[in-house]
Amino acid sequence: MTRLTGTALRMTILIGENDTWHHKPLFSEIVHRAHAAGLAGASVFRGIEGFGACSLIHTSRLLSMSEDLPVAIVIVDSEDRVRAFVPELDELVGEGLVILDECEVIRYSRDKKESA
């Protein structure tokens, strides 16, 4: 298990919910590759409204436009490990945005002995 405390790098990947990679959801492919790369963690968040390069607003409030909502994949690990993962995204993301920002991690975990 990777232990992560202190300064880290957060990568946020913004794509569309309908973006795919070989007929699979792109967000799922990114998470699986991050896991295979041994990164500390990744989470996917579905947006309720947003727009991107095409300037078309996608929202969950209108039935006709609720099909391609924004998705954010957040990955946190050490700077060198996150930057080493960027080439994977070069292959996968055709249209989207990748944001890298420094963050401080405070990890809370329960000791297995305490929970028994």
Image (cartoon, rainbow, N blue to C red):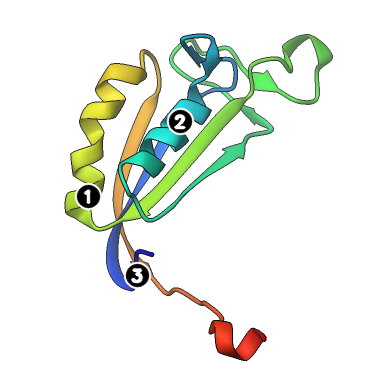
Relative height, residue 5 to residue 98 (above, below): below
**Which comes before the other along the chain, label 2 or label 3?**
3
Say which of 111 and 71 sits in front.
111
Q: Residue at x 65, y 19 (%)?
A: 58
| Residue labelled with disc 2 | 14
- Residue 10, image x, y percentages: 35, 51
Mark number displayed over residue 3: 3
Q: Amino acid at mark 2?
A: Leu
**C-alpha distance separating marks 1 and 2:** 19 Å
At x 25%, y 22%, the residue is: 90
Residue at 30% x, 26% y is: 89
* Label 3 or label 1, whichever comes before in sequence order: 3
Q: Is residue 18 above or below residue 3?
A: above
Q: Is residue 112 left or right of residue 77?
A: right
Q: Amino acid at mark 1?
A: Arg
Q: What's the mark number on residue 81?
A: 1
